[in-house]
Image (cartoon, grey):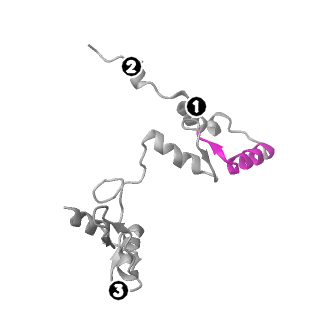
Amino acid sequence: SPEELGSDEDAIDPDLMAYLSSLHQDALAPGLDGQDKLVRKRRSQMPQECPVCHKIIHGAGKLPRHMRTHTGEKPFACEVCGLKIHMRKHTGERPYCCPHCPARFLHSYDLKNHMHLHTGDRPFECHLCHKAFAKEDHLQRHLK
């Protein structure tokens, strides 16, 4: 049977549609005077509520970025392979440097985990024998 365009599965959230329409308000009302522009500027600096999930978003211009979590839009793609989740992988850039050894990392969380090796901190504890490890993968290997 042919798909129905108006089915519930394909329906777009009305709040999301209202938000997307509001992005193009300037095109609908191009002649704003100075007072209207000032009101709009103040309004853009106030915390805003997401019309879809009702989360309060602080900071000018951050609501459109938050809305991408609902629309699935990923506007920044890797120029090498087209993936939209990374940029540095192909360039070899590793901006997070260990202050104690030559190790460099792609992500800050990898440096944070690496630092356990230098500090002696062992936050990953075996629930069976209570032996502690500096890295989570070392604990996982121990558990096998």
Mark 1: which amino acid?
Answer: Ala
- Picture quadrant where residue 30 is located: top right
Which amino acid, mark 3? Cys
User: Is most of the magenta stretch helix, strand or loop?
Assistant: helix
Region rendered in magenta: 35-50
How much space separates mark 2 and mark 3, taking CA atoms? 59 Å
**What quarter of the picture does the C terminus occupy?**
bottom left
Residue 22 or 130: which is nearer the viewer? 130
Q: Which residue: 74% across, 49% down?
A: 42
Label 2 sits on a secondary structure element that is loop
Label 1: few (<14), some or many (≥20) within 10 Å? few
Viewer-side residue, 110 vs 16? 110
Residue at the extreme front: 129
- Name the residue that disc number 1 marks: 18
Which element is circle 1 on?
Answer: helix
> In this picture, is 131 found above or below 8?
below
| Mark pair 1, 3: CA separation | 53 Å
